[in-house]
Image (tube, rainbow, N blue to C red):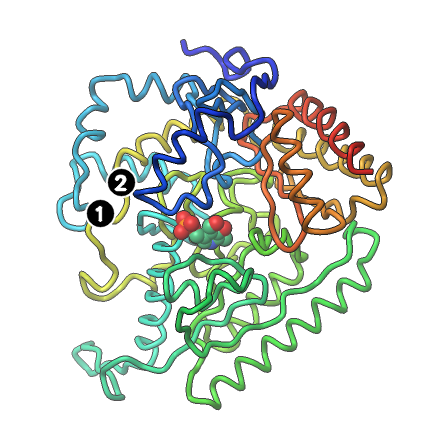
Amino acid sequence: APKTQVEYDYDGPSMKTSVPGPRSQVLNAAHVYSQNVGAINFFCNYDESRGNYLVDVDGNRMLDIYTQISSIPIGYNHPALIKLMSDPSSLSTLVNRPALGILPPENFPDKLTESLLSVAPSGMSRVQTMACGSCSNENAYKAMFILYRVSEYYYCCCHRPFYQGVPGCPDLSILSFMGAFHGRTMGCLATTHSKAIHKLDVPSFDWPIAPFPKLQYPLEEFTRENAQEEARCLEEVEDLIVKWRQKGKPVAGIVIEPIQAEGGDNHASPDFFRNLRNIARKHGCAFHVDEVQTGGGNTGKLWAHEHWGMDDPADIVSFSKKLLTGGYYHRDELQADKPYRIFNTWMGDPSKNLLLAEVLNVIRRENLLEEVTRSGKALLNGLYDLQAQFPGLLSRARGQGTFCAIDICDDATRSSILLKARDKGVLLGGCGDRSIRFRPSLVFKEYHVHIFLNIFSEVLAQHK
Ligand SMILES: Cc1ncc(COP(=O)(O)O)c(C=O)c1O
């Protein structure tokens, strides 16, 4: 039997150089001729990386609490995944990447049932695989537009659909929220509003943008104020839907993240989402929940929208990152009526479904969602303690499971803290204007939380 992850993990960070080390710098200098290297942090040694620890080419071993922008579900080189991929029967899936929309392999329906369909959100029995998060959202938007037009068909006595208007490219819109991030392709970018640089110089659509609630934390202490803020935002949503209909650009769909991630880890209450879902229904807009970052277990549930306690949470749920393949679940009505309307060459990658089926087995076998809830509590309590200890430096600790964040007094101090933490062997990410986000994999246990808190408090002490 494969060793469990706990035995397989390293016992702590180990630093040999500052990061990026000399070897990373040499590689970067060579790479600069073929790519824009501005975003590269350092080069990695994925052979040596294990569990919660990412090893770089200079031999530095870092506790990874950012996990490749939240996309590693069960740590590096998990023995169960190595075993699966070492099995000769996996080879053909790895070697041959099919055009899934036209020539899927024999086992594709079974693998979908074992992987994505085994964790389908409530009310959804259909899934469309795609390559990445943006590609998933982009196609989900198309599906919502197509559905909107179908609702304008009428059916003759032989049940043939007829479109009453002029066929073509209609003026429809998607309503999104300030601070949202849904990707960087053109349609997605029109609904992304987290940082100006993402959109600079790129044309966009005239689509409505509603305010996302700006809540006060801890949420339990500000229920009245937060409820008022959420009501204000919901009112604005309805106003915008009416305005855009009057402008001749009706809202075909509403897209929202359960927790705005890239935009600064902004939370809203289950009540807010339930009311928003009802507004969407009332106005005939499809409701799209983007779980690209929140999906996969970090919040303590496989889907963050499960925290809302609804049987009918959405019409579309998109995913990628920890699910290893992109795609979206949808209700039956969102199935396009003709082939090639929702289509591209690869439409996903069967080798990722193979891996995902095993990842889900590990999550179930090792009770990883319970572990996440446990380590999430330890992490958030630790952040509350540090916030009390460093009040000038830290504020607004918040989170659900290990999907946590904290604000730093300003952007420059945040950058300095992130770099110092990295040199001490802890990898973290930023989000929003001045937040640090925590995105460990699901094998991040309570003792990893304590390793992190010890190192982080040393770093904070240097910034006092
Ligand atoms: C909520 C959300 N949606 C969509 C995306 C886009 O995914 P990708 O970068 O795979 O295109 C991201 C990426 O961070 C995301 O966080």
Which residue is at 60% across, 19% downward?
13
Residue 122 seen by the camera: no
Name the residue type under label 2: Asp
**Position of residue 307 measured from the top left corner of the image (x, y, whole percent):** 61, 48
Residue 70 seen by the camera: yes
Residue 337 position (above or below residue 444): below
| Disc 1 crowd, CA 10 A, few/some/many (<14, 14-19, 20+) | some
Position of residue 158 in the picture relative to residue 62 (left or right)? left
**Position of residue 9 measured from the top left corner of the image (x, y, whole percent):** 53, 16
Position of residue 269 in the picture relative to residue 386 (left or right)? left
Indicate the secondary structure of the residue bearing disc 1.
Answer: loop
Name the residue type under label 1: Trp
Residue 392 position (above or below residue 274): above
For the residue pair 38 and 213, the one nearer the viewer reads as 38
**Position of residue 215 measured from the top left corner of the image (x, y, whole percent):** 73, 59
Residue at the left extreme, as displayed: 103
Position of residue 10 in the picture relative to residue 404 (left or right)? left
Which residue is at 24% across, 81% downward?
168
Residue 195, disc:
none
Which residue is at 53% across, 38% downward?
297
Task: Place residue 455 in its image quadrant.
Answer: top right
Indicate the secondary structure of the residue bearing disc 2.
Answer: loop
Residue 349, disc:
2
